Structures are given as C-alpha cells and as structure tokens.
C-alpha cells in the first residue's frame, strides 16, 4: 500500500475565550511534575464519516471555538512553563489542520503503522519536541481529515502537567463543550497537584539515563482480545490456587516476563508500574489535573533469572497492598491529603534514588484502562479507535489501553530495535496477543 501522506493545511494559535484572572496567573508544579522527563502525553481519537458533519470547515470551526472555551477552564494549557511554575499568560495552544488524500481511514485502520500514526500528531511544528514539552507549547492539537470523510484528532499535552487521567479529563471536557453540555456533565478541573505532592524544588534532580534520547526505539501494537484474556487469567489462576487476576495484572505480568527475557548488560532488570492515585485516596477528585500517580519499582530480577507468571502476580499484588497500607497510615495520621502526598513522594523518591542506570535497566508498564476516552463525542459520534502513548517515544515502555469493546486490551510496546525482534516473536506472548490486527469499526 502507498505510504500515507499527511498535508498540513493550516496552523493557528487558539487562546482562551476569556482572560485568566490575575490571581490564577502562576501555577506551582509539584515535585512529581518536575522530575518527569520532557515528553508529551498524547492521545489519538479516530472517527468515521458522519453525514451530520459533512464539511471540514464546519468541523474545524466547532473544534476551535469549543477548544477556546475549554481553555478558560484549562487555562494553564494556554501558558508556558518557567522553571518550576507555569505562567498562565493566555499565550495559547496550537491547532493544526491537515488532510490525507491518498489513503482512506479504513485503509489506515486495516494495518495501522505506528510511524504513520506519528504523522497525525502536531509534533512536526516544533524543532525539538523534548525542548518544547519542557517549555512551550503545552498543548498542541492536530485535526486530520481523510478523503473518505473520516478524521483523527491527535492531542499532545506536556507530561509536566498531565498524566493519562488528566488528558482523559481534558478530552471529555472539550467534547462536552463542543456538544454544549459541559456544565451538566463535567466537574471543573482543579490544578492543585502541588497541594498533594510537595511543591517542586528546582535544585532537586534524580539520576538521568544519558543514553535515553540516543537509542533507536520502535513501537508495535499487540492486541489481547477478550477471549484470550479470559484464557490467560484462568491459566494463571489455576496455578497454585491463585485468586483470579485482573485483566491488567495478567497482561502486566506476561509483558514483564517477555521484557525480562531481553538480553542485557545490566545486573538487574526492574519493572516500574504507574498507579493513578485519584481513585485510591478519597480526598482526591477525579477532575484533579497533574501527575497524581505513584510509580516505583514493583519487580526486580537478576541478569540470569527467569520470571514466572504466578510469582510476578504475587509480587504485583504485594506492592499494591504495601501502597494501600502507606495511604491508610497517612490518612490516619492526618486529615490533610498533603500529608499522604508527602509520605508517598518520600517513599517513591527514596526508591528511585537507589537506582543506577549503570546497574539497573528499568521497564515501565502504564495502564490507561478504564479511562472513558471512547466516550469522547464532539457531536458526530464516539471514536472508533483510541490510542494513548507518550511522545517522543520513550524506550522500554508498554502502554495498556482498553479495546473498543472494553473487554480486550491493546498494548503499545516501545523497545530498542534489537530487543523488539525477540519480543514480537515470543511464543508465550503470541499465544494470547495478535501483532497489529485490523482495527474493527
């Protein structure tokens, strides 16, 4: 099939429809915001043709006007980062329009190519995405129209102020605004992450992997259909009478086992798992924007060790229970969520400070499952396919996201090219997952 060609039509700056009040002009970043690498949290939403929205001009006008209104509530996204704060100066977000004339959406979804997928993000408008994610623009959007009438919306928000739950909240709010319903269905976002985790300190630094941006990584899509997930969960549960694992637990354990089989010169491979804390701490609102996550080493193996699924599951659950105990202890000792945040941050940063990139090779699994991105209707129906990831590509990473039916899981795995070949041929993985099957619409 001919390579997809994406042609940029226009680019403009979208400013909030009303000015940000003076008392909201400076947003303090949290310590967690500060330590994250300069990358974007990204989401792709794909929509098939709808006769009610027959003209690109009308669609773009609706997207841009509703985005302008949305930015009055998400005002930091129209600002720029300055050190450990965001200057909420209404400078605006970037909105790019593009067109694909040589490939219908159905053709692209038949075997979605990840490199082609990146063309549907607006990253080509900045010279250095790493620098841009750390400064400005904080929010970039690209609406791409396919000749068949389908479209994609690619959204980039700097990871310095947005985790997966944050981008989900933003997308849902924007979509509700486009439908004229946001006041009825959505809580206003809260930008108070630094009231939970301690405020960022510019002098604080964690060890950095100096080679991270120099490696050649490749991303591939693996789909675990509902029937295979059930089989995987039942297989693991039958071993030594384990309680039946969740979908995410099962896939995480299996991917970790496959990661661990990669050749490495490091003494230890470690698995870092991200957990959204909003649902775990009662005082935190779902509409809280920022990096309200817990991430720490949950599993570790030596160079010659092998991973057993049942042992990995036990360890994953043990770490989950330990986090629950930390949260409970913090809640009992204080009525303030900031006390819990300080204790969790201390636990997390202490663990990270013990790692060395010379002796430890980190792998990360992040779950976007249960985020309601498939509900994002701007007035022309819900998306037929949703993708979540980070950009530029971050190595040794797996992003898990629900399939459209809510039962299966799609895993977007990024590895160095030399490790991906062995990973994609792992027979235990392929017994439960298919490599890049057609997206069913």
Image (cartoon, rainbow, N blue to C red):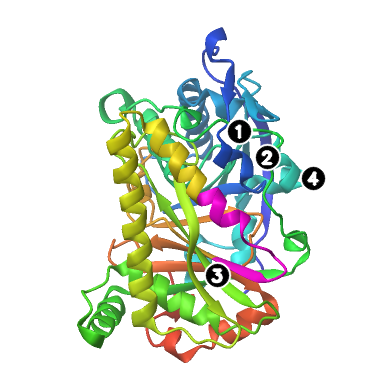
> What is the spatial separation of the Cα atoms under label 3 and label 1, in whole angstroms?
26 Å
Depth-wise, is mark 4 or mark 1 nearer the camera? 1
Q: Is residue 354 above or below residue 162?
A: below
Q: CA distance from mark 2 to mark 3?
A: 23 Å
Q: Which mark is residue 127?
A: 4
Comes first in the chain, label 3 or label 4: 4
> Circle 1 sits on which residue?
200
Q: Is residue 101 visible?
A: no
Is residue 355 rendered magenta in the image?
A: yes
Cα–Cα gap, marks 2 and 1? 8 Å
Task: Name the quadrant containing residue 1.
Answer: bottom right
Q: Residue furthest front?
A: 333
Q: Which mark is residue 204?
A: 2
Q: Relative to 23, does residue 283 appear above or below in the rendering?
A: below
Mark closer to the chain start, 4 or 1: 4
Residue pointed to by mark 3 = 270
Question: Which region shows up in magenta?
Answer: 348-363
The reply to whether the C-beta atoms of the residues labelled 3 and 4 are less than 8 Å apart is no
**Does 28 appear above or below 109?**
above
Nearer the observer, 433 or 45? 433
Is the Cβ of the residue at disc 2 closer than 8 Å to that at disc 1? Answer: yes
User: Is residue 25 something that shows in the picture?
Assistant: yes
* Residue density around tag 3, few if under 14, some if 14–19, many if 20 or more, within 10 Å: many
Depth check: give the residue in front, 162 or 270: 270
């Amino acid at each position: 099939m001919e390579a997809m060609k994406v042609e940029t039509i226009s680019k403009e700056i979208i400013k909030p429809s009303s000015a940000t009040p003076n008392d909201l002009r400076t947003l303090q970043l949290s310590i967690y915001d500060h330590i994250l690498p300069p990358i974007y949290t990204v989401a792709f939403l794909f929509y098939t043709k709808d006769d009610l929205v027959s003209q690109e001009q009308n669609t773009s006008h609706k997207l841009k006007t509703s985005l302008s209104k949305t930015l009055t509530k998400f005002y930091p996204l129209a600002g720029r980062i300055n050190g450990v704060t965001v200057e909420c100066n209404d400078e605006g977000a970037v909105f790019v329009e593009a067109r694909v004339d040589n490939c219908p959406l159905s053709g692209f979804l038949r075997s979605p190519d990840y490199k082609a997928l990146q063309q549907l993000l607006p990253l080509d408008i900045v010279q250095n995405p790493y620098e841009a994610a750390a400064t400005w623009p904080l929010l970039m959007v690209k609406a791409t129209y396919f000749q068949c009438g389908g479209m994609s919306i690619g959204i980039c928000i700097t990871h310095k102020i947005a985790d997966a739950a944050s981008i989900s909240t933003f997308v849902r709010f924007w979509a509700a605004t486009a439908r004229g319903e946001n006041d009825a269905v959505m809580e206003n976002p809260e930008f108070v992450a630094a009231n939970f985790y301690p405020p960022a300190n510019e002098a604080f630094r964690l060890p950095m992997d100096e080679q991270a941006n120099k490696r050649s990584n490749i991303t591939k899509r693996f789909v675990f259909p509902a029937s295979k997930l059930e089989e995987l969960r039942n297989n693991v549960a039958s071993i030594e009478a384990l309680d039946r694992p969740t979908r995410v637990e099962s896939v995480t354990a299996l991917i970790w086992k496959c990661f661990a089989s990669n050749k490495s010169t490091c003494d230890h491979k470690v698995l870092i798992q991200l957990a959204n804390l909003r649902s775990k701490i009662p005082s935190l609102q779902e509409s809280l924007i920022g990096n309200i996550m817990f991430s720490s080493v949950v599993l570790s193996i030596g160079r010659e060790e092998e991973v057993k699924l049942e042992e990995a599951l036990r360890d994953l659950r043990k770490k989950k229970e330990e986090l629950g105990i930390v949260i409970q202890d913090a809640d009992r000792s204080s009525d303030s969520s900031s006390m819990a945040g300080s204790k969790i941050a201390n636990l997390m940063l202490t663990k990270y400070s013990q790692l060395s990139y010379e002796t430890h090779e980190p792998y990360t699994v992040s779950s976007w499952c249960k985020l309601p991105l498939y509900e994002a209707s701007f007035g022309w129906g819900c998306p037929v396919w949703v993708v979540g990831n980070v950009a530029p590509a971050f190595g040794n990473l797996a992003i898990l996201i629900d399939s459209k039916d809510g039962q299966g899981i799609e895993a977007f795995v990024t590895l160095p090219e030399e490790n991906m070949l062995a990973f994609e041929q792992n027979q235990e993985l392929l017994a439960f997952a298919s490599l890049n099957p057609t997206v069913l619409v």
